[in-house]
Image: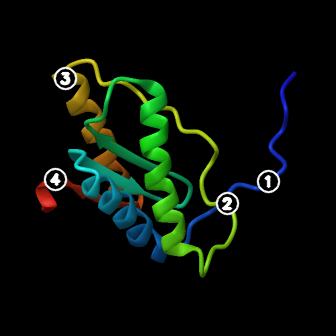
Amino acid sequence: MIAANSRPPVSFPEDFFLVLGGALLQKAQEQQHEVLAVSVDHHHAHVLAKLPIDRSEIKRIVGTWKQHASHAVRDRLPGRVWASSGDPIRVTDRGHQLNVFNYIVRHGNQGAWVWTFRDG
């Protein structure tokens, strides 16, 4: 059986992109995680970061980032901001890492807010 999601998808206004992305980045850096790239657009975010191998630990860590970002916009966007799950992808080698990094950066071509380690 498949349950349908009864909530409409959240669409972030453009002025939220920086706030949400900055909050995700800030929390990750506060937790001492190495972040290489972040993007946020109207419907989703991507983060390329060095995280532990354990999948449940990844979900816990990313959950703290999402909570921090939600709190940053809750005065203007109350309620649920993020989907209940994300699908972390394990980067397998340097080539894969470069592909993921470039994929995230290319979101800027479609209007997303993008940050990379080059931005400081």
Which of the numbered marks, if any, corresponds to residue 7?
1
- Report the amino acid beneath label 1: Arg
Q: Secondary structure at mark 2?
A: loop
Task: Say few, some or many: other residues with alpha carbon within 10 Å of mark 4 (under 14 / 14 to 19 / 20 or more).
Answer: few
Q: CA distance from mark 2 to mark 1?
A: 9 Å
Which of the numbered marks, if any, corresponds to residue 80?
2
Image quadrant in which the C terminus is located: bottom left
Q: CA distance from mark 3 to mark 4?
A: 18 Å
Left or right: 87 in relation to 6: left
Q: CA distance from mark 4 to mark 1?
A: 35 Å
Counting from the top left corner in percent of width and height, residue 105 is at: 28, 49
Does residue 26 sit above or below 46 in this rendering?
below
Q: Are marks 4 and 1 in contact (CB under 8 Å)?
A: no
The mark nearer the N terminus, 3 or 2, is 2
Q: Are marks 2 and 1 in contact (CB under 8 Å)?
A: yes
Left or right: 35 in relation to 104: left
The mark nearer the N terminus, 2 or 1, is 1
- Report the amino acid beneath label 2: Arg
